[in-house]
Image: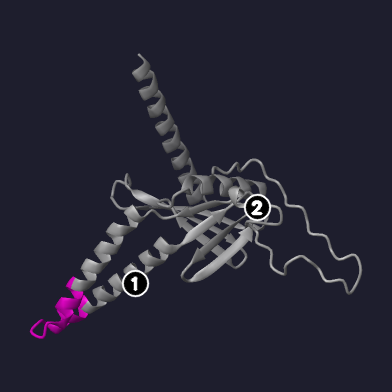
Amino acid sequence: MAIRPKQHVEPEPAQAPKAPGVPSTVPSTVDPVKPAGVGDSEVQTMGYPSKLMAPDLAKSIVGLLICGVIALIPEMLAIIQWTSAGLALLFVFYFARTVIRFQSKIYVSEYGIRLSSLRGGTAFAWPELSKFRLRYFSTKRDGNKGWFELTLQAGDAKIVAESTLDGFDDLLEISRDWAKDNQLLVDDVTRTNLMRMDEAETLVKAAASERKHGGIN
């Protein structure tokens, strides 16, 4: 389900009890993603694909086993053992981080966003968005290969998503639109990365159009 970020519709506010002593039917906690009257079909569920997580899990397990074995060899030099032990701990951290990311789900609607993971969850309504940041991490010196990291924050609530997330483009579009609506100031790095993504999208569309017209001819 593709979200239309330009069509912002504010949910109808809940009505207060008409008289004191009458119990309210409104729940104490309101889901910002699914306020009253919003159905499941209006919420997009995003997650990290298993085909991308599997290689990271395999790398962390292999690295942990290799470093762990080296650290436990009695005849090995102490400095090598301690170095291997330190690397093993890093692989443990990497493995845990990958598992948490793989299990995490992000729920998005026109009204808000919610993150659910092994570490807990957090949520906020889009009008509460107070920070929008986009970073790029390169895996090569030329910067041609890497991933984007989107950080969204509202007060103490913080949600971070990587570009490997299924639905990342939709999330970026709607959060970017709300950042404009909320008149947020973005830093120069975020502005540059947004321009980079816009250019990449333009190139993809141009290539697709060229293939289409080429096939017709």
For residue 113, above or below residue 84: above
In depth, the one of 33 and 95 nearer the eye is: 33
Instruction: Give the residue furthest to the bottom.
Output: 74
Image location of residue 11, percent across then percent down: 73, 52
Magenta span of residues:
66-84
Decide: marks 1, 2 in contact (CB < 8 A)? no
The color scheme shown is: one colour
Name the residue located 30 percent from the left edge and 60 percent from the top edge: 56
**Lateral position of residue 140 relative to residue 156, left or right:** left
Disc nearest the viewer among 1 and 2: 2
The image's mark for residue 111 is 2
Name the residue located 40 percent from the left edge and 51 percent from the top edge: 164
Mark 2 surroundings: few (<14), some (14-19) or many (≥20) residues within 10 A = many
Image location of residue 85, percent across then percent down: 23, 79
Q: Which amino acid does label 2 sit on?
A: Tyr
Q: What residue type is labelled 1?
A: Phe
- The secondary structure making up most of the magenta span is helix
- Name the secondary structure under disc 2: loop
Task: Tell whether position 73 is magenta.
Answer: yes
Image location of residue 128, percent across then percent down: 66, 58
The image's mark for residue 93 is 1
Q: Earlier in the sequence, mark 1 or mark 2?
A: 1
In depth, the one of 210 and 38 nearer the eye is: 38
